[in-house]
Structures are given as C-alpha cells and as structure tokens.
Amino acid sequence: MNVNELQFMNWGYADLDEHIDDNTGYYSKKLYQQVLANISLTDQNVLEVSCGRGAGAAWCTRTYAPHSYVGIDSSRDVINLCEQVYSTIPRLSFMIADPKIHLPFQNESMDVVLSIETTNIFDEIEAVKKFVNEIIRVLTPNRYFLWCGLCNVDGSSVLIDYLTANDAFVIKEKVNITRNVLHALDIQNNSRVDFIERYIQPVDQEYCRLFAGLPGTQLYDNMQQGRAEYCRVVFRKKTTTDRSAI
C-alpha cells in the first residue's frame, strides 16, 4: 500500500459550496481546524487519542508548533506506520495505548486532549466511563478536551452526558456540523470507495465502508435521515475552585 494514500481517516468537514475532491486530506484538515475551535496548541502539551495513521498529528504539529504532541492508538501496525512516516518531525511522538483501558501519562500532564471520532466505535458505557476518567486524570485544570463525533438527535451522547454529569467539565462550545460532514463524505466518496476496493480484503470491506461513514452505510444514513447528529464540542476541565463554588 502506498503510505501517502488515505493518510487521514476522519470523515472531514466541507463548506456547503465546496465540491472538489483533491485527495490531499483537505477536508480532513478542515475537520481538525473546526474541532480546535481557535484553542491554541502553540507551546502546549497535546495528546491525540486514537490518532490513526498520524497525518492529523503531523499536520497539527507542523501548523501550530505545540511544545509536545503525542499520538496514541491501540494498533501496533498503525503506530509502526506513524513512526516510519513521521519520525523526522520535531516534538511529535507516537505510542501504543488503548484509551479504553489506560492512558500512560502522568496526572495533569496534558494541556489539550484531542479526540476525533474516537468514540464512534465505543459500544459499551463502561468503556466510555473509563476513557472519560482517564481524560480527567491526565488533563490540566482549566484546559481543554476537544471532541467530535456522533450524537443522538437531541445532541446528547453517552460521552457528553457522562462528561458533564460527573462535574469535571463545562461545555464551552457545542456545534452541530452534520450537514458539513455529510457534504465532505459525499465529495470524498469515489476516492474512498476506490481505496477500499483496491487495498482492503473483500471480507473486511463492508466494515471499512461503515467505519469510513460512506454513503449507503448505516452511520451515514442515520445522519442524513435525522436519526443522529455529528457535533464538535469544546470541554473545559474545571478547577477545584469551580467545583467548590457550585
């Protein structure tokens, strides 16, 4: 497989008047820009959970000059690929870790934690709770957990509900970007179908199409038919003062 193909695995974000699929990851980078929501990464310690092939981590590091940027993923193959392709970028590193079990970082050591569609495939509430508790532990007070992914039509999700119910976070901003994500998926459909047919074993193609949110899959149809929303959320971790005042 050509490592330069399909470096980005997220669904992307497109303005509604955009229509060109140029295969450069343009729409995936735009999704990162949306999720970052003007929160500065410069000189910050950043953790990206489930970083995939690492293209987003590399782009963020080059673009925003964080103090450090760590991408984690539970797949050894994926992390090996990240290290092979991006080993020359200063301040960027990768490691194998499963966010549903443990984040191998010290308490309050991260300024920004980034989660792009990570929880779309969390199917158990216990996994979500463990993930949230680990985010709370490693994040510095008053700093940010930046998340995007699927929600229920009322904008709720197990993750959002648990994050706010345990009183560790406040929601600074929450935006429904479903139409823009659907538009990006439409634009990129041909190139992604082509990639899956060329490189993915037939037995795995259906799962890959679902994971990629392609038109005709349940995840895509749920969004298009109003059974699900795609949101981006800026969570700020409360300080102890915030909590005692409530």
Image: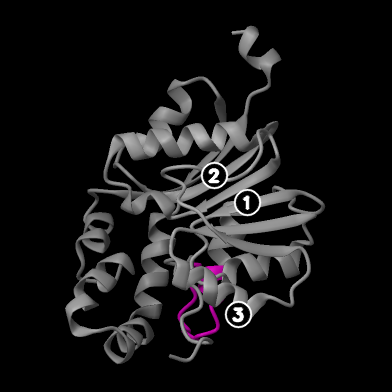
The C terminus lies in quadrant = top right
Tag 2 and tag 1, C-beta contact below 8 Å: yes
Give the image location of residue 20, x and y in percent. Answer: 48, 84
Which dot, 1 or 3, sits closer to the camera?
Answer: 3
Q: Is residue 135 inside the magenta stretch?
A: no
Majority secondary structure in the magenta region: loop
**SS for callout 3:** helix
Q: Residue 243: where, in percent of width, then height?
A: 61, 13
Residue at 28% x, 72% y is 208
39 versus 26 height, above or below? above
153 relative to 169, above or below: below
Q: Is residue 107 left or right of residue 165?
A: right
Residue in the picture at 77% in, 49% down: 44
The residues bearing labels 2 and 1 have C-alpha atoms spaced at a distance of 10 Å
Q: Using the numbered discs, state the Cα–Cα distance from disc 1 to disc 3 in whole angstroms.
A: 19 Å
Q: Secondary structure at mark 2?
A: loop
Label 2 vs label 3: CA separation?
23 Å
User: Identity of the amino acid at label 2?
Assistant: Leu
Residue under label 3, please give it: 84
Give the residue at mark 1. Answer: 47
Whether residue 16 is visible here, answered yes or no, is no
The answer to which image quadrant residue 85 occupies is bottom right
What residue type is disc 3 on? Gln
Q: Which residues are magenta?
A: 14-29
